[in-house]
Amino acid sequence: MDSGAVAIVIAWVLGAYALVVSIWGGLKQRQDLVRSGEHAVLAMWAFTTVATADLLRGLVSRDFNLEYVAQYSSSTLPLHYTVAALWGGQAGSLLFWLTILSSMAAVVILQNRHQNRTLMPMVTATLMAIAVFFASLLVFVTPPFQRLAFTPGDGRDLNPLLQNYWMTMHPPSLYLGYVGCSIPFAFAVAALVTGRLDDVWIRTTRRWTLFAWFFLSLGNLFGALWAYRVLGWGGYWAWDPVENAALMPWLTCTAYLHSVMIQEKKNMLRIWNMVLVILTFLLTIFGTFLTRSGVISSVHSFTQSGLGPFFIAFLAVAATLSFALLMWRLPVLKSTNEIDSMLSREAAFLVNNLVFLGMAFAVFWGTLFPVISEAVRGVKITVGPPFFNRVNTPLGLLLLFLMGVGPLLAWRRASLASLRRNFFWPTVAGVTVAVACTVGGIRHGYALLSFSLCAFVVATIVQEFWRGARARQLLLGERWPVAVARLTAKNRRRYGGYVVHLGVVMIFLAITGTSAFRVEEQVTVKPGEAFEVGHYRLLFEKVDAWETAHSAHMAAHLAVFEHNQRVDTLKPEKRFYKKPEQPATEVAIRSHLGSDLYVVFGSYDSASQTATILAYINPLVGFLEWGGLTLVFGTLIAAWPQRSARKVPEWEASAAASSGSHSLS
Amino acid sequence: MKRKARLGFAAVVLVGAVAYLMYTGVRETAVYYITVEEFAQRRHSLVGEGVRIAGRVTPGSVQRRMSPRGEEVWFELGDFQDDGHVTPVIRVFYVGVVPDMFRDEGGSDVIVEGQYDGSILRAQTVLTSCPSKYEAIEPGSDSQGTRK
């Protein structure tokens, strides 16, 4: 038996032991038992790591006698994709998931050796319940260390679609995000069970939530970039069930990140926050279920198997238990505080939450519509991307608006004077951009609104930085860059949040540009013929063919002319992979500030020498990456540890006070 | 209490708006999603309807021709039988670029979306459902392919 297989079984035993002992120790208030459970978790972490290392060893040493290795890699697969094959298949990705979960559980236990001792038994128990579920799948249903009766000469190779740079990063990010959501969930469950319902559990998991959210965002973005570069249909988001599966927990998690501030500040929305944490966790499991079960046909559900029923059972148990706990504690959770005014930050956040939840629900409904309609009416009916766009576009724009308004409204009640002071310049910016766009010939209603709101939000953010920095400059005589840097460093959560918002605005720009102003051309051409797309002229020169051990290639050479000047040569390819005999498309992209020229080599008929070329112009799509980078930067600022023991000097307090509104945190 | 009512009102408006958008969205974009087998049973009731049909490309039925509008593709969408044969059910016409995984020999599983005009299906989209495993499913073998 492989050492990895043994390690998984031991990890399962340790997880089950930790689960039982933690609950027992928590009930009987026996610290020795609780500690013993925690040590078991640390040991479990070691054993899952050994198992993962062993699978990696099998992959890297090309041990094709292992079924998993034979199925998801080959002798010609480059090393980095061989490592990525760890999460390229089902058993491997479940093992990877379990390893991440046990690693995070170990970190949580090390962090809380001397604090949160009442919460910890149930935190451990909850995390271990999840871990035991995944470990059970690995032990009983899809063991990753299955040996073959014979050793094949070579493996079947990783799906060519997965052999892409972004694809190596997309699944790990998403898993880190998914698994990260279990930590706040575990603390929420512990708070419900123990009745410690103050905001300790929220403060303890603040950074974990941010961590999970960060990786969920990255996972979604990497997935979009992968789809854009690899799938070759010119877009990056198709509202496919698997994409939706990753988006839904992100929506509820984002809602939670915002509403949690209200609980910390005003001790309100305590039930609501519990619901959001539970929902987010359930949606991460549901997302894995959608991806793994194939219950809804998806263009890229890469792994379909009989795991569906197990996930459904686990989901049902988790949902029942957590909502039952919530119902039980409902009387204690009821908050005494109320919203004072509709014109307050609380109200804006509440509306923001409703919109996020509305979007999540619409996405959920649309994704499950075939299943729902079949159950209700006996016919399977699907809704396509137009449904999702139709619902989410107005809701998204409302969110964009709230993103500008929310942070500038005062807590409790905003005065008319403060409204005028805070929103004069942003409104001017928004209106100016709207007028400029109209004059520039944009007639697309949603696009106009979106651009205008983007300008409005950016203006609010700039104004916030400007006011804060200006106050420091006046009071302390700091130069501008120093003032901005120190201002941010002193209020990381607030200004980091603004930077994240800036990134989101960029993503909105990209979405608006590509959905409203995309140009699409499909032509059949012979060598020497040219065609136009947007303001470019493309000349089809020739087809070039070559071969490697791994794949055969055929590239169309397209000369790109802009204003009669040759500016580039694009070489989109058709590839043919040899191991899984499968063709693949390699798009060619000319990225330019403002827009991408995106060409796909559709098909080629060698007899008549005609080629089908698809060409797209995707305006503003580059902002997707810039927005992602900005979002990363902002999250890092917001999550960076701050020495809290320091007393705030008087001057700093006055500088913050004169900078307009109150702190976000 | 008045404030609470106002907030409740805002929530109701929002929920109503979401519900309205979803309702009209479903009404305008919904298509029947059926298998070729179901299509064969009720094809007469589907004339003029938007349908999304899952089936298999009948081996040997694909004809391709370059046209100025792009590649014209004709094929028979068929039903995959237990004995491994594919019975043709409906003729599909599509102009555009078919996905990489669309193949004639061996037959690939596809999802075709378009309008049925009584004799042929004019497809707007042809999607291949991506097989997760690479065991070529030989006629006659079980769906697990070459697993030991």
Image: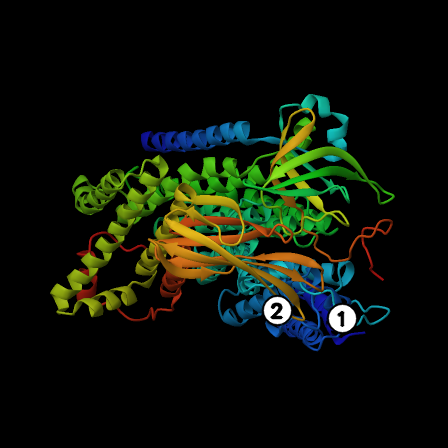
Question: SS class of the residue under badge 2?
Answer: helix
Q: Residue B27 is drawn in which quadrant?
A: top right
Position of residue A273 measured from the top left corner of the image (x, y, whole percent): 46, 48
Q: Say which of A563 and A325 sits in front.
A: A563
Cα–Cα span, label 2 and label 1 = 16 Å
- Residue A586 in view in this figure: yes
- Chain for numbered disc 2: A
- Callout 1 crowding tier (Cα within 10 Å): few <14, some 14–19, many ≥20: some
Q: Quadrant of the C terminus of chain A?
A: bottom left
Kindly indicate whether the residue at mark 1 contacts the one at mark 2 (C-beta within 8 angstroms).
Answer: no
- Judge the density around disc 2: few (<14), some (14-19), many (≥20) Cα neighbours within 10 Å: many
- The residue carrying mark 1 is A154
Q: Residue A395's x, y, as percent?
A: 41, 39
Return the residue nearer the eye: A259 or A236: A236
Q: Which amino acid, by three-letter code, is at mark 2?
A: Tyr
Q: Work out whether A186 lies above or below A382.
A: below
Question: Is residue A216 in sight in this rendering?
Answer: no
The amino acid pointed to by label 1 is Asp
Which structural element holds mark 1?
Answer: loop
The residue marked by circle 1 belongs to what chain? Answer: A
Residue A174 vertical position relative to residue A249 in the rendered view, above or below: below
A511 horizontally vs A133: left or right:
left
Q: Residue at x 33, y 47 (%)?
A: A403
Q: Can you tell which quarter of the image residue A497 is in?
A: bottom left
Kindly identify the residue that appears in the image at 46 percent across and 44 percent down.
A520
Q: Is residue A355 left or right of residue A65?
A: left
Mark nearer the viewer, 2 or 1: 1
Mark 2 — residue? A81
Residue at figure coordinates x 70%, y 47% from the top left: A313
Q: Position of residue A248 (x, y in %)?
A: 52, 47
Horizontally, residue B117 falls left or right of residue A630, namely: right
